[in-house]
Amino acid sequence: MGAPAIVIASANHAAELSEAFARYEREYDVRLVGDELTAKLTAKELMASGHQVALFVIDTDHDQDKLYTLIAGTRKVVPTARRLIVSHISRFRTDNATFRHAVAAGKVDALLLMPQGPRDEEFHGAVGELINEWNATVATPVVENVRIITPEKDALTRDLLDYLGRVGMPAGVHHPDSEVGREVMAKCPDDEGRWPIVSSLAGWCGHCPDVRSLANQLYGRPDEIDVDEVVDLVVVGAGPAGLAASVYASSEGLSTVCLEAEAIGGQAGTSSMIRNYLGFPRGISGMRLAQRARGQALRFGTRFFTGWPATGISPCEDGGHHIVHTDGGNVHTRSVLVATGVDYRRLGVESIEELVGRGVYYGAAMAAARELADDHVVIVGGGNSAGQAAIHAARFAKEVTIAVRRPDLTATMSSYLIDEIQWNPRITVRGCTRVIDGGPDDVDHLAWVTFEDVDSGEQERVDARGLFLLLGAAPECSWLPDTVLRDERGFVLTGRDIPRERWAEDVPPEDLATTMPGIFCGGDIRSGSMKRVASATGEGASVVSSVHTWLGQ
């Protein structure tokens, strides 16, 4: 496969753009064309010759009708490519007003001022972000941090790929008889016949029976790291709330340990693009946001233990602090933040549950979406995660259907995502609809699903190769002691939501405090939370002041 391409379409500013993009020519095939017809033909020729198109750069100095044709045409020809509109300074103010809606609706990924001279790093920083996201979600990795060797891409292999994508680790899958497969198998011949075999750049090579084993190998088990002192704060869960708490607590000098059962970032890490997070005008993927937060927390001294879930909390014998239990060891701490988030609710249809990992996925499963080119994909769910999953899937799939029980998406999804979905010709929303059945093809992969109208009961069977289930929040906090009070749905009660009879001297607990002294809760698992990344981050940051107050008692 040749180098990925950047196609620049400019009628009147070719010289300036050619000079600006010269710095990318070492690693990208930069093509300069003058009109919309040539741009589309160039993209088709590149793909026919084995190249991927990473980025279209479109100058606004075209006839307006032709410009809109060019924007729409690039998406139709290469839906996975990023699209950047550049405007000359003489018309930037007008173009900013004209194309604001196009950016908001996702028709283009960004509108930038054309470079004004050499080393316009503000411009190149934005270009780098677009290419970075393309490389993370579309491109075939040039360097594979992890190699998976298996005769077939089964459900476990897809789970491993999904996990590696969530933690931002480039990976590849290879057949045992391939050149890479033979090279890896030569390092661990004793494991031949037990699939998959996983090899990492860190030097580990062997059979990988599940995702947790992979996490342990990549990040180390808790019982391999000494935590023999009583720390100030243990954060259980490294989603947005847990990561924010880790950053702020450790930056203020609190000794902080963060336990994460699976992937850093939690459910937010599966979001292909979050466009409404403060400070990221062009959006950021959940994985990038989580990895940046992890790096920030590490810089301040947080210790992360990945791969073991917390299994309980108990008081120390002397009553002076808590013990957080895991299967890999215990951590003694003066305070705890419960930020484990939630799981997706199960659909409960036996025929579909049998196909999980073979066309049926709980969550966004970004890696699986790449395999569904030219297929029909069904997304079940009406929240922001479902909207982001549909937009990502539409870059690959021929057709995407969002099935939601409500009449439409307005009650549960952010407006910016609804606008983007309405504009995207590949996405259809079916309101008042649920999935009641599904079945496999002759190789035991999902082939069809049955829709049912929730009002009339009318049923329709449709072909579908992918079914992504994002069905809302299901809290899993059975590991917490009974002294931590939950609401009727299982979410943890905090602050003024705690029944008055549980208040001390008729004074309400602090906003994020639970009914167990020294135990706090934030993020999606907290009763009454907004179920948004930004609100979870805010709770994680704000709980640190409560921890300080508790430690000072």
Image (cartoon, rainbow, N blue to C red):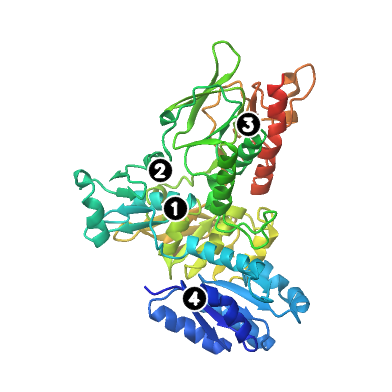
Q: Residue furthest right?
A: 506
Residue type pointed to by label 2: Leu
User: Sequence-wise, which precedes: disc 1 or disc 3?
Assistant: 1
- Image point 63% across, 60% down: which residue? 283
**Comparing marks 1 and 3, which lies closer to the viewer?**
1
Label 3–label 2 contact, CB within 8 A: no
The residue under label 3 is 492
Residue type pointed to by label 3: Val
Residue 493 percent coordinates (x, y): 67, 30
The residue under label 1 is 169
Element class at badge 3? loop
User: Would residue 192 be found to the left or right of residue 85 on screen?
Assistant: left
Q: Disc 3 and disc 2: Cα gap in Å?
A: 32 Å
User: Sequence-wise, which precedes: disc 2 or disc 1?
Assistant: 1
Q: Disc 4 and disc 3: Cα gap in Å?
A: 54 Å
The N terminus is located in which quarter? bottom left
The residue under label 2 is 218
User: Sequence-wise, which precedes: disc 3 or disc 2?
Assistant: 2
- Image point 44% across, 47% down: which residue? 349
Is residue 487 shown to the viewer in this render?
no
Residue 437 percent coordinates (x, y): 44, 54
User: Would residue 309 be found to the left or right of residue 446 on screen?
Assistant: right
